[in-house]
């Protein structure tokens, strides 16, 4: 397994980060679970969520850590998925960056 780590800056409160991440997960589940299966996610403490899913027979496990200035995403990429690490990183940055961008609603 190859590790992938990225940081996305933000200027939001902890509550707003949680709300946006939870809303993003709800949308991802609604859109993708019928194709890939369950997306497991759980806040294990106020600043850390564990995430897991399987895609095309490959298991992806990771965690999301929040702080006052950034969100840190760590994902263990299974063997063949490491060949696509750049595309995976870009997709996470775009999705998470979009979630965290903009004013508090």
Image (cartoon, rainbow, N blue to C red):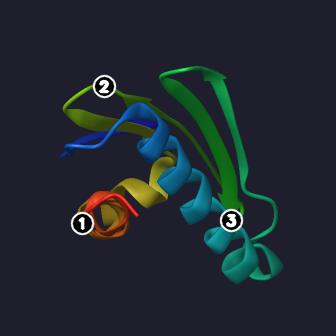
Q: Is residue 12 left or right of residue 47?
A: left
The residue indicated by pointer 1 is: 102
- Residue at 66% across / 45% down in the picture? 52
Residue 84 location (% of width, % of height) = 33, 66
- Residue at 62% across / 41% down in the picture? 51
Earlier in the chain: of badge 3 and badge 2, it is 3
Q: Is residue 58 left or right of residue 71?
A: right
The extreme front residue here reads 105
| Circle 3/circle 1 CB separation < 8 Å | no
Viewer-nearest of discs 2 and 1: 1
Label 1's element?
loop
> Against 90, is 43 above or below?
above
Find residue 74 and report its image quarter.
Answer: top left
Residue 82 location (% of width, % of height) = 37, 54
The residue indicated by pointer 3 is: 26
The Cα–Cα distance between marks 3 and 1, rounded to whole angstroms, is 19 Å
> Against 57, is 73 above or below?
above
Q: Residues within 10 Å of mark 2 (few under 14, many from 20)?
A: some
Rendered-image quadrant of the C terminus: bottom left
- Residue at 31% across / 57% down in the picture? 100
Q: Nearer the viewer, residue 98 or 58?
A: 98
Q: Residues within 10 Å of mark 1 (few under 14, many from 20)?
A: few
Residue 17 location (% of width, % of height) = 42, 44
> Against 32, is 37 above or below?
above
Earlier in the chain: of badge 2 and badge 1, it is 2
The Cα–Cα distance between marks 2 and 1, rounded to whole angstroms, is 18 Å
The residue indicated by pointer 2 is: 67
Residue 36 location (% of width, % of height) = 74, 73
- Residue at 62% across / 71% down in the picture? 28
Find residue 90 and report its image quarter.
Answer: bottom left
> Against 92, is 49 above or below?
above
Q: Is residue 33 visible?
A: yes
């Amino acid at each position: 397994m190859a590790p992938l780590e990225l940081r996305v800056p933000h200027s939001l409160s902890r509550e707003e980060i949680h709300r946006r991440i939870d809303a993003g997960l709800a949308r991802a589940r609604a859109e993708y679970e019928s194709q890939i299966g369950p997306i497991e996610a759980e806040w294990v403490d106020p600043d850390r969520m564990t995430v897991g899913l399987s895609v095309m027979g490959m298991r992806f496990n990771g965690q999301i850590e929040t702080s006052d200035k950034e969100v840190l995403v760590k994902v263990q990429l299974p063997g063949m998925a490491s060949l696509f690490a750049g595309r995976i990183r870009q997709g996470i940055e775009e999705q998470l960056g979009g979630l965290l961008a903009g004013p508090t609603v």
